[in-house]
């Protein structure tokens, strides 16, 4: 590229939410990266929370954690899974964080007594953050959360308008993702919602360079012509985006729509020809694998599967790389308390107990763990899942009837899981935490190195590596006081991080692994989590041997 200055692609959404702006942005970024360009993505969220960390999963879906410890929107998980690159705190910000920053500077006197206003001060802070995320990149995609017309999104739209004006033609483009609904009773696809959405964009001062049209039905040529004419975009910049059998098919669908030609022309990127051969092979395995396993996914946020987005995607990655369909049987842990293990878990090849917060459903999760342990069913416990594996083993195998986590009983006499007073966070800063410490600031967050034990299952899973790095999101830790008692009965520690127990594994069991970290946060389609791959392999072996 002759011009090494960062070029920007702004992605907005119209008509309604949940159309897949994040998937569209990630798909475009994947195509550009596979053309040899250096690409990154930023998600700007208009809601007022500082970050999603304290939001209920039922409210906002999963909280995705980056390696540098940022609690971010779940779309950053999609970005990483598509790009196979680590993103950072700078790749996601909210209205709350923007206002907090501006108010903090005002309190310090940085504005020299001026009246602080949305324009220019809030808008300038938004553009500053966008430009910071773009440093060192050939192309930065910027997804604006929400829907055009939302009141809270107006400063963000003004910011991208101002930034586009600042950098000039050839360095930015606006992509608007919208819906073309099919009215069943009329038997017609309707363009009017898209026309109105584009009108709203124009009223704000933005004109789309490309329309990505979500639809259940193929768009006829005359309808694409109508959209191009009425919305003022080039005919080849009207991109059809039909429902796909998997989100990983979307980049390939965009490629068939020749999406890179108008992008290249608008941004002066030259001839773009991505190498998608490996991606295409994996997608074919996702859609039509040669074998199948069934995994019991034991959790409590089952009304909203988005709460476990990274985990469900990591099973797709593992399955694609093993040419195996991973069928998840969703099991509400509270139902196990009512109906028992045999009715809900007898037909599965593996049992996963996922992370979570709070006491609800804990008894059912421990019943599932006991069932996996005694029936020798491959088991994976993640975060709380590992902690409950320790508590269940302490109660049943060690005979410590009052064993518990102080998350559920702060006065318990045998705290198998406890709250350490201090720890070093991902940035190297010492953190202090107690029961009364605010939830939003004192969890162990981000990537930490873990030393694997020689001859352990964990080291085998990570193909002989003595040091691994995985991400965390939790407040409570396994209590090392009980380590000797556990290991005497065959529940071994397989990994440690600065003295903290990172994993446990059961001897004389085909696959029983609990990890304090979240391996799903680093799983990608082209680079799946080794923990999930090994777990699915063990489940497949059980299915094969009965």
Image (cartoon, helix red, strand yellow):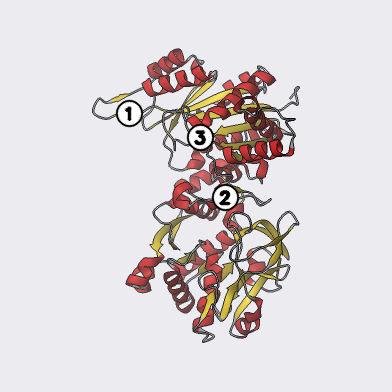
Q: Residues within 10 Å of mark 1 (few under 14, many from 20)?
A: some
Q: Which mark is residue 182?
A: 1
Quarter of the image that includes the C terminus: bottom left
Residue 176 lies, in percent from the top left, at: 50, 26
Tell which tag, 3 or 1, sits nearer the viewer: 3
- Which residue in the protein does label 3 denote? 21
Is label 2 in contact with label 1 (beta carbons under 8 Å)?
A: no
Quarter of the image that includes the N terminus: top right
Q: Is residue 194 above or below residue 540?
A: above
> Is residue 258 shown to the viewer in this render?
no
Q: CA distance from mark 3 to mark 2?
A: 17 Å
Q: CA distance from mark 2 to mark 1?
A: 34 Å
* Residue drawn where x is 58% and y is 76% of the image: 416
As helix, strand or loop, the secondary structure at mark 1 comes to: strand
- Which residue in the protein does label 2 denote? 64
Residue 354 lies, in percent from the top left, at: 50, 62
Q: CA distance from mark 3 to mark 1?
A: 20 Å
342 sits to left or right of 432: left
């Amino acid at each position: 590229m002759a011009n090494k200055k960062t070029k920007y692609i702004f992605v907005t959404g119209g008509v309604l939410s949940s159309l897949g702006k994040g998937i569209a942005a990630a798909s475009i970024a994947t195509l550009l990266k596979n053309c040899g360009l250096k690409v990154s993505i930023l998600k700007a969220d208009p809601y007022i929370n500082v970050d999603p960390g304290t939001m209920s999963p039922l409210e906002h879906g999963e909280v995705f954690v980056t390696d540098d410890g940022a609690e971010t929107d779940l779309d950053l998980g999609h970005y990483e899974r598509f790009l196979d690159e680590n993103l950072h705190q700078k790749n996601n910000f909210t209205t709350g964080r923007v206002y907090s920053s501006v108010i903090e500077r005002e309190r310090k006197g940085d504005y020299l007594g001026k009246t602080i206003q949305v324009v220019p001060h809030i808008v300038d802070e938004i553009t500053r953050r966008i430009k910071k995320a773009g440093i060192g990149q050939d192309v930065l995609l910027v997804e604006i959360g929400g829907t055009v017309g939302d009141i809270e999104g107006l400063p963000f739209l003004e910011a991208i308008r101002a930034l586009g004006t600042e950098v000039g033609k050839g360095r930015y483009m606006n992509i608007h993702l919208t819906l073309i609904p099919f009215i069943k009773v009329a038997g017609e696809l309707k363009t009017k919602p898209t026309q109105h959405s584009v009108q709203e964009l124009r009223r704000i001062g933005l004109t789309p360079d490309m329309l990505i049209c979500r639809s259940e039905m193929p768009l006829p040529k005359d309808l694409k012509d109508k959209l191009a004419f009425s919305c003022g975009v080039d005919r080849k910049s009207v991109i059809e985006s039909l429902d796909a059998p998997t989100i990983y098919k979307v980049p390939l669908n965009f490629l068939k729509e020749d999406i890179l030609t108008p992008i290249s022309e608008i941004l002066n990127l030259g001839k773009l020809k991505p190498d998608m051969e490996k991606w295409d092979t994996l997608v074919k395995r996702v859609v039509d694998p040669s074998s199948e396993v069934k995994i019991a996914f034991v959790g409590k946020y089952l009304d909203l599967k988005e709460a476990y987005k990274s985990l469900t995607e990591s099973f797709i990655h593992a399955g694609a790389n093993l040419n195996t369909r991973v069928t998840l049987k969703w099991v509400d842990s509270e139902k196990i308390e009512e109906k028992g293990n045999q009715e809900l878990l007898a037909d599965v090849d593996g049992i996963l107990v996922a992370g979570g917060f709070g006491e609800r459903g804990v008894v059912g999760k421990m019943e599932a763990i006991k069932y996996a342990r005694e029936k020798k069913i491959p088991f994976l416990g993640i975060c709380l899942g590992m902690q409950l594996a320790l508590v269940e083993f302490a109660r049943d195998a060690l005979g410590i009837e009052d064993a518990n986590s102080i998350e559920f009983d702060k006065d318990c006499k045998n705290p198998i899981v406890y709250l350490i007073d201090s720890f070093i966070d991902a940035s190297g800063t010492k953190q202090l935490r107690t029961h009364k410490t605010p939830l939003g600031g004192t969890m162990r967050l981000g990537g930490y190195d873990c030393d694997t034990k020689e001859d352990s299952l964990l080291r085998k899973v990570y193909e002989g590596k003595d040091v691994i790095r995985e991400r965390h999101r939790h407040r409570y830790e396994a209590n090392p006081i009980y380590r000797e008692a556990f290991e005497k009965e065959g529940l071994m520690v397989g990994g440690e991080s600065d003295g903290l127990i990172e994993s446990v594994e059961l001897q004389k069991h085909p696959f029983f692994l609990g990890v304090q970290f979240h391996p799903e946060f680093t799983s990608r389609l082209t680079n799946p989590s080794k923990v999930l791959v090994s777990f699915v392999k063990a489940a497949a072996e059980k299915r094969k041997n009965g």
